[in-house]
């Protein structure tokens, strides 16, 4: 039996439970990729009032059934100043607002660590919202 290739999965959300279109798509992509790859990844924690009844520990346990995942909070959700600054930077630079949403030193450190220690052969960037992470994946 051959060892499966290692895949780094980067997602703008924790897709479990798959309760809406984006979560359903992400969950099914992850589920199918995990059949053929050894998966490790990073998910941003995007609070969703529809999931308030599902503990985050349960959601992450479901994710970890398909690989090893680390969770990162979206920085601007903890800081109104960051939220305003991200919108202002978007206007001033002409970049899409989503360029700034997932800008996180913690996420960058986790991705660098995963690239170094997990050494993936393939990277799956789950949505255009994660485009900010592409420069971190050089090499």
Image: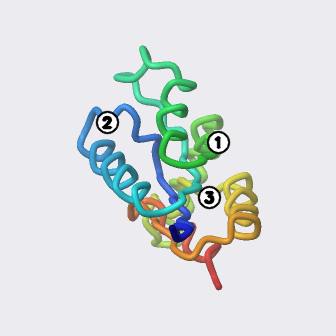
The alpha-carbon separation of the residues under discs 2 and 3 comes to: 25 Å
Pair 2/3: label in front: 2
Q: Rounded to the nearest whole Å, what is the CA distance between mark 2 and mark 1?
A: 31 Å
Q: Quadrant of residue 136?
A: bottom right
Distance of label 3 from label 1 (alpha carbons): 14 Å
Which residue is farthest front? Answer: 1
Residue 128 position by quadrant = bottom left
Residue that label 1 marks: 81
Quadrant for residue 60, please give it. Answer: top right
Q: Is residue 8 above or below residue 139?
A: above
Kindly identify which numbered label has been placed on residue 96.
none
Tell me: residue 135, above or below residue 69.
Answer: below
Q: Residue at x 57, y 25 (%)?
A: 57
Secondary element at image label 2 = loop
Q: Is residue 125 left or right of residue 45?
A: left
How would you rate the neighbour count of disc 1 (Cα within 10 Å): few for under 14, some for 14-19, many for 20 or more?
A: few
| Mark positioned earlier in the residue sequence (3 or 1) | 1
Residue 78 placement (x, y as % from top left) = 64, 35
Give the number of the mark in front: 2 or 1: 2
* 79 sits to left or right of 50: right
Taking the spot 28% from the left edge, 32% from the top edge, the residue there is 19
As drawn, which residue projects farthest toward the top?
Answer: 53
State the SS at label 3: loop
Task: Please say which color scheme the image uses.
Answer: rainbow
Q: Residue 18, which numbered label?
A: 2
Residue 103's mark? 3
């Amino acid at each position: 039996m051959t060892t499966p290739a290692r895949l780094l999965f980067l997602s703008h959300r924790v897709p479990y439970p798959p309760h809406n279109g984006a979560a359903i798509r992400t969950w099914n992509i992850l589920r199918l990729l995990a059949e053929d790859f050894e998966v490790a990844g990073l998910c941003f924690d995007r609070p969703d009032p529809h999931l308030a009844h599902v503990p985050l520990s349960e959601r992450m346990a479901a994710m970890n059934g398909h690989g090893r995942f680390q969770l990162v909070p979206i920085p601007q959700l903890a800081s109104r100043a960051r939220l305003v600054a991200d919108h202002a930077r978007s206007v001033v630079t002409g970049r899409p607002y989503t360029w700034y949403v997932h800008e996180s030193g913690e996420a960058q450190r986790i991705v660098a660590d995963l690239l170094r220690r997990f050494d993936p052969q393939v990277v799956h960037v789950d949505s255009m919202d994660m485009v900010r992470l592409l420069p971190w994946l050089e090499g």
